[in-house]
Image: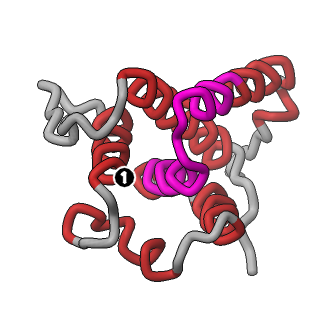
Amino acid sequence: MDKTTVNLSKTNSAAYRHVLELDGQVAEALAAAGVDGKLVELVKLRVSQLNGCAYCLRMHTRDAIKKGESADRLAVVTAWWESQYFTAQERAALGLAEEVTKMVVPERADWDDGSLTPEQISAISWLAIVTGVWNRVAVRSHYPVAP
């Protein structure tokens, strides 16, 4: 029996358009909260790592590089808590994104050191949620990732 591959963006384009709209609203919230573009890409990258989405990993790595992110920081984002590469705000955002992605219960909240404003916490939480949706669309649709 062959595996059935369904491109979710094409078989239910209305739902896909709604995710695009949500993604745009999250981008507006991030900008309004003053979240740096490089941090946005780091969060997208970390959530995509946790969700095992090769398509999004490649895309967000490339986007982060275009925004000026360094190879060293990209190399250690998988173990951000063990490095000295990230600011307190970046560490808080990455911890929050992991908490949202992993749905840690009871709430861990060790990332909550006051480095993020309530608006930034909301925007980054939504960023992790919508990135998780994109990861699931890409993985389930078997988007090709080839050199």
As rendered, which of 39 and 101 lies closer to the eye?
A: 39
Image quarter hosting the C terminus: bottom right
Classed neighbour count for the residue bearing mark 1: other residues with Cα under 10 Å, few (<14), some (14–19), many (≥20): many
* Overall secondary structure of the magenta section: helix
Residue at the image position 74 percent from the left and 46 percent from the top: 5
In the rendering, at what x and y percent does residue 20 appear? 76, 29
Task: Give residue 43's position: percent from left, percent from top.
Answer: 47, 49
Tell me which corner region of the image, top left, top right, bottom left or bottom right, holds residue 6: top right
**Residue depicted at x 24% and y 72%:** 83
Indicate left or right for 3 with 42 as reference.
right
Residue at position x 12%, y 25% in the image: 106
Residue situated in front as seen by the camera: 57 or 76: 76
Judge from the rendering whether residue 4 lies leftward or rightward of residue 91; answer left or right: right
47 to 60, vertically: above or below = above
Q: Which residue is mark 1?
A: 90
Residue 51 on image: x %, y %: 45, 49
Start-end of magenta stretch: 25-48
- In the shown orientation, is residue 110 left or right of residue 95? left
Instruction: Tell me residue 45's x, y (percent).
Output: 51, 56
Residues 110 and 138: in front is 110
| Circle 1: element type | helix
Please name the amino acid that badge 1 sits on. Glu
Is residue 147 shown above or below 138?
below
With respect to residue 90, does 71 lie above or below? below
Question: What residue sits 36% from the left and 22% below the top?
Answer: 118
